[in-house]
Image (cartoon, rainbow, N blue to C red):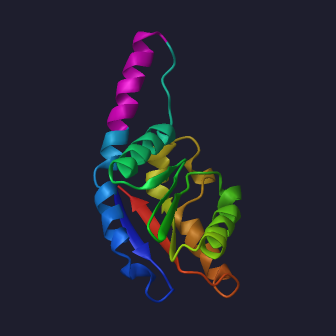
Amino acid sequence: MKVEFESTYQGALESPHLAEVKSILDGAWGSAVDLFSARNHVREQQKRNPKVGKQSDLNEVLEARFEENLWHGSDGRFYKDSIWIRFSFRHSMSLGSDFLEAYRVHKLEGFQVVCLMYADENLLQKIWPSGGQALCSYEKSVAYCSQLNTVLNMPLVIGRLHS
């Protein structure tokens, strides 16, 4: 999995931890697909219906990789030093709450950089083939962010996850 970062906030992209995040994510999608396939193989041997979506497998891989690299957190929320990151594979109705949570951790917990990570629409279709269009996407987040820039002033970075 690859990631590209963007920000309208001056200096936000200079965080050295963003390069580390790129390294952590390198190969994560392949690991999630392998885990998904292995679990479905077991399900098929047990005469159970295979899973369709890979979201839980991807979340598990991400959590393990961030933990291995001494980041703190769980459930798609990780932090290290002064940077906080949120991976969101939630329904698009949750998009506003992602931005509000980022604003809250910046203002109340003092994080210098807050980063919201979203898969692009192509990757979302691979993560959840039957419902990817209903999830928060990079494209939706950028459009929403452009509406909020004048209202929520924070050191926000948007990450575009793609395969």
- Residue toward you, 17 or 87: 17
> Looking at the figure, which quarter contains the C terminus?
bottom left
Question: Is 131 drawn above or below residue 114 in the view shown?
Answer: above
Instruction: Name which residue lies at 49% across and 48% down.
Output: 125
Q: How many marks?
A: 0
- Residue under the point 36% across and 33% down: 35
Is 35 one of the magenta-colored residues? yes
Does 7 sit left or right of 136 as displayed? left
Residue at position x 44%, y 77% from top?
A: 6
x and y percent of residue 25 in the render? 34, 55
Q: Is residue 142 above or below residue 38?
A: below
Main SS of the magenta part reads helix
Q: What is the x, y in percent for residue 97?
A: 69, 62
Residue 70 drawn above or below residue 156: above
Of residue 128 and residue 159, the one placed in the foreground of this image is 159
Quadrant of the image for the N terminus?
bottom left
* Residue 39 shown in magenta: yes
Asked where in the image residue 139 lies, by quadrant, the reply is: bottom right
What residue is shown at x 51% (from left), y 86% (from top)? Answer: 9
| First to last magenta residue range | 33-47
| Left or right of 70 on screen, residue 54 | right
**Residue 136 placement, left or right of 118:** right
